[in-house]
Image: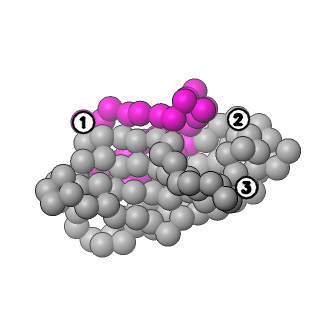
Amino acid sequence: VQLQASGGGFVQDGGSLTISCSTSGRISNLDAMTWYRQAPGKARELIALIRNTGSTHYKDSVKGRFTISGNIADRSMTLQMNDLKPEDTAIYYCNVRTTTPPFDYWGQGTQVTVSS
């Protein structure tokens, strides 16, 4: 199983960007699909999650600006990011978590850079 993140890039303050994550291989017992990010010198943080029920959760700082969507059938997901700020600059990682057995699959990360 491999997760492939794509769509990162360079954007100006206030701009928009959509990143995507596709899955190759079979993943059973899906729990949730999640986007994390890691800025230089900082810990990786959860920013958006979509559960197998379709419910979503966002980090407070991205609420109203970011939208996660997911295709439960093929375990793919996207993150639409609007009104980007320099503090959103980070490497963005996609994650798929399973319930039984509990396991985390990770993508390789895609860089998002927002200039002021």
Asked if disc 1 and disc 2 are in contact, CB closer than 8 Å, the reply is no
Residue type at the position of mark 1: Thr
**Number of marks drawn:** 3
Residue 93 image position (x, y, % from top left): 50, 58
Magenta-highlighted residues: 53-80
Element at label 1 = loop
In the rendered view of the protein, which quadrant contains the C terminus?
A: top right
The CA distance from mark 2 to mark 3 is: 13 Å
**Mark 1 crowdedness (10 Å alpha carbons): few <14, some 14-19, many ≥20:** few
Q: Which residue is mark 2?
A: 83
Magenta region includes residue 95 = no
Identify the residue shown where x is 25% and y is 61%.
103
Magenta region includes residue 60 = yes
Judged from this view, the residue extending furthest toward the top is 64
Residue type at the position of mark 2: Asp
Residue nearest the viewer, comparing 103 with 63: 103
